Image (tube, rainbow, N blue to C red):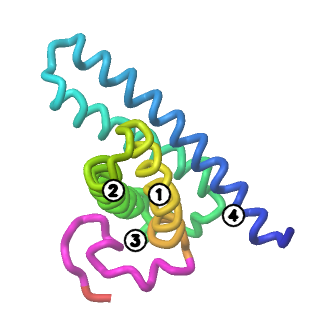
Amino acid sequence: MDNRLERTFSTFGRFLIVGLAGTIVNLLSLAGLVRLGLPNLGAALLATEIAIIHNFLWNDKWTFKQNQASTNGSNSRLARFGRFQLVTTLTGILSLGLFAGLNSGLGWHYLLAQLGAIGVATVLNFGANSKLTWNRNHVRSVPGWLKTGTGEMQDY
């Protein structure tokens, strides 16, 4: 197997491990927040964000550590987190749409539809984050407002 492909599979494996750990963090956070009295939907939203932060930190420190050429400007941790949050949000929305299409449109059982949606979203999430969040060679092609992590348009 070629070295680059081997590295990609290794990185994807770490990404999956982080995602599995994030799922556990999400579920434990959800249970704790509901137990504290938060409404289910609010608890689910907060638990999801906690898991997103968890996943970002582990992916940043472990999964994609070799891709961090610098830690300032367009590759600062804050800028990477902003891009990760955006990618995760977009793939989450896509996952919900795919779930609805598979479940309601095609009549798939809800658990099978969710598994299919998660599978597609995971691959897209990995691909997009590999290129947009942690690929130091492609950061220059990212729009300025994604580079800064501030949400503000910048000239580069």
Residue carrying label 3: 73
Q: Residue most toward the right?
A: 1
The answer to which of marks 1 and 2 sits earlier in the sequence is: 2
Q: Is residue 154 left or right of residue 80?
A: left
N-terminal of the two: label 2 or label 4? 4
From mark 4 to mark 3, how far is it between C-alphas?
Answer: 26 Å
Give the Cα separation between the discs numbered 1 and 2. 9 Å
Specify the quadrant of the image occupied by residue 35. top left
Looking at the rendering, the stretch of residues picked out in magenta corresponds to: 137-154
Disc on res. 8: 4
Instruction: Please tell me whether mark 2 sits on a helix, a strand or a loop.
Output: helix
Kind of residue at disc 4: Thr
In the rendering, which numbered label is found on residue 120? 1
Q: Give the Cα separation between the discs numbered 1 and 4.
A: 17 Å
In the displayed structure image, the side of residue 117 where residue 11 appears, left or right? right
Residue 51 visible to an observer of this rendering: yes
Badge number at residue 98:
2
Q: Answer yes or no: do the residues labelled 1 and 2 have beta carbons within 8 Å?
A: yes
Hey, which residue is sitting farthest bottom in the picture? 156
Give the residue displayed 46% in from the left and 36% down from the top: 22
CA separation in Å, label 3 and label 1: 32 Å
Find out whether residue 142 is within the magenta segment.
yes
